[in-house]
Image: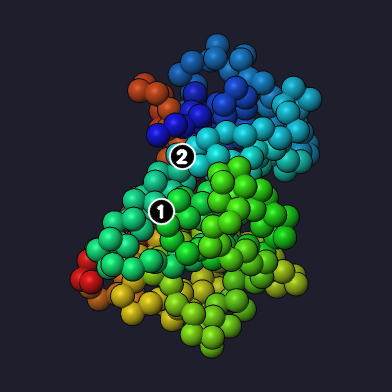
Amino acid sequence: MNDQYELLDSGNGKKLERYGDIILDRPCAQAVWAPRNPGLWETATASFDRVGGLNWEGRSKVSKAWNVEIAGVVMKLSATDFGHIGVFPETRSLWQWIRSALREQAQTKGRELKFLNLFAYSGGATLAAAQAGAQCCHLDASKGMVEWARENAKLNGLQDAPIRWIVDDVIKFLRREVKRGNRYDGILLDPPSFGRGKKGELYKIEDQLMTTLDLVHEVLSEDPAFVLLTSHTPGFSPIVLGNLLRQYHQSGTFECGEMLLTGKPGVNELPNGNWACWINTFS
């Protein structure tokens, strides 16, 4: 599977990454060690920092937008004012897992599965699920991000795939889905530490996550495949995320771990968030 992403080095509070032909130097607070290859940082196409504001250096060298294949999904990238580029590559192994799990479970269950992606950003996981043949629902509170995800769908030849594109507040949407009787076999949610809904609704993970998970449990199908919970919020460790999921399921398999940015052998793995998953093994 083609993958044009690579972590080149990290250290001194920064990460050096390759996205296709573009090499970016950006902040990463958890990279508290010293870089292993200091000379490599001189090859950066552009760099970003937050010292005294939000600052790009060499941004003019980066195309307004460029396309990169990551874990079998083509993604449009762009250097935004806030230093983000339209993908979080630490989730790429989860995309691969979702694609594989949905294909396997569809064969086992003998039916097409429905996948729900909440706080879905630019759509990497949604498109991986669509590649597996699942019916998808992609939800994000940002209209701009949902449009970005739709562009990514076109890049992957999935513009006509069965994907519902929803701009909405997650809790309001889930409550309507409960009333409508819509159910899903696989659910991914990546709640932010702090966010705003479609109409400015405040989302704070410590206040709203339990309500969100209650509703997620209600929209699961009678014979679901999995629930995958991820987080970039400090303190929400793999064990914490796993314990949250264990409240809702008495059987099945629970797994958890760190999301990692990785490169070639010898490059320090860089933790960047955590995940936990409940897998229904009693279908």
- Count of picture labels: 2
CB atoms at circles 2 and 1 under 8 Å apart? no
Residue 79 marker: none
- Is 88 positioned to the left or the right of 47 in the image? left
Query: Which corner quadrant of the image does residue 71 belong to?
Result: top left
Residue 255 position in % (x across, y down) = 29, 57
Spot the residue most to the top: 39
Coloring applied to the structure: rainbow
Residue 82 position in % (x across, y down) = 72, 43
Instruction: Examine the rendered structure and indicate whether residue 267 appears above or below residue 139.
Output: above
Q: Residue at x 66, y 48 (%)?
A: 151
Q: Residue at x 58, y 83 (%)?
A: 176
- Is 148 positioned to the left or the right of 216 in the image? right
Q: Residue at x 54, y 88 (%)?
A: 179
Task: Identify which residue, 101 or 215, lies in the foreground.
Answer: 101
Residue 100 position in % (x across, y down) = 34, 51
N-term mark: 2 or 1: 2
Task: Please name the residue that numbered disc 2 is placed on.
Answer: 72
Amino acid identity at mark 1:
Ala
Spot the residue most to the bottom: 179
Residue 99 position in % (x across, y down) = 39, 51
Task: Please name the residue that numbered disc 1 is placed on.
Answer: 132
- Label 1 sits on a secondary structure element that is loop
